[in-house]
Amino acid sequence: MKPNGEAYRNLCIGCDRFHEKVMGPEIDCLHTERLNAKRATG
């Protein structure tokens, strides 16, 4: 809990930003690569 009693969005402070800024684009890229591979084979 935050000092004001509200729940954190994520237990790891900063993780939400990291996932939004770093992991989001990486996951999107991997997803696109997988889709392109599937289209190429079938």
Image (tube, grey):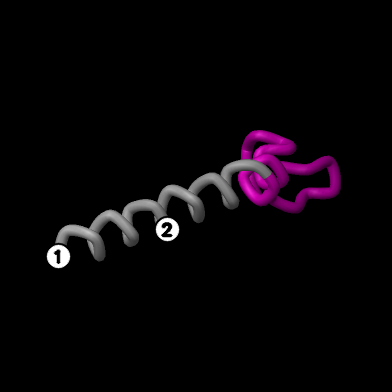
Q: Please state which amino acid type lies under the numbered disc 2.
A: Thr
Single out the residue that lies furthest toward the top.
12
Between residues 26 and 42, which one lies in front from this camera angle? Answer: 42
Say which residue label 2 marks.
Answer: 32
Q: Is residue 36 left or right of residue 19?
A: left
Say which residue label 1 marks.
Answer: 42
Q: Is residue 7 above or below residue 22?
A: below
Between residues 3 and 24, which one lies in front from this camera angle? Answer: 24
Between residues 1 and 31, which one lies in front from this camera angle? Answer: 31
Q: Is residue 14 left or right of residue 42?
A: right
Q: Magenta stretch mostly in which secondary structure?
A: loop
Image mark count: 2
Q: Is residue 19 magenta?
A: yes
Quarter that holds the C terminus? bottom left
Q: Residue at x 72, y 36 (%)?
A: 13
Asked if the residue under mark 2 is in contact with the one under mark 1, i.e. CB atoms within 8 Å, the reply is no
Crowdedness near tag 1: few (<14), some (14–19) or many (≥20) residues, C-alpha within 10 Å: few
Residue 1: x and y, percent? Answer: 71, 42
Single out the residue that lies furthest toward the right.
4
Q: Which residues are magenta?
A: 1-21
Residue 20: x and y, percent? Answer: 66, 51
Q: Residue at x 65, y 42 (%)?
A: 22
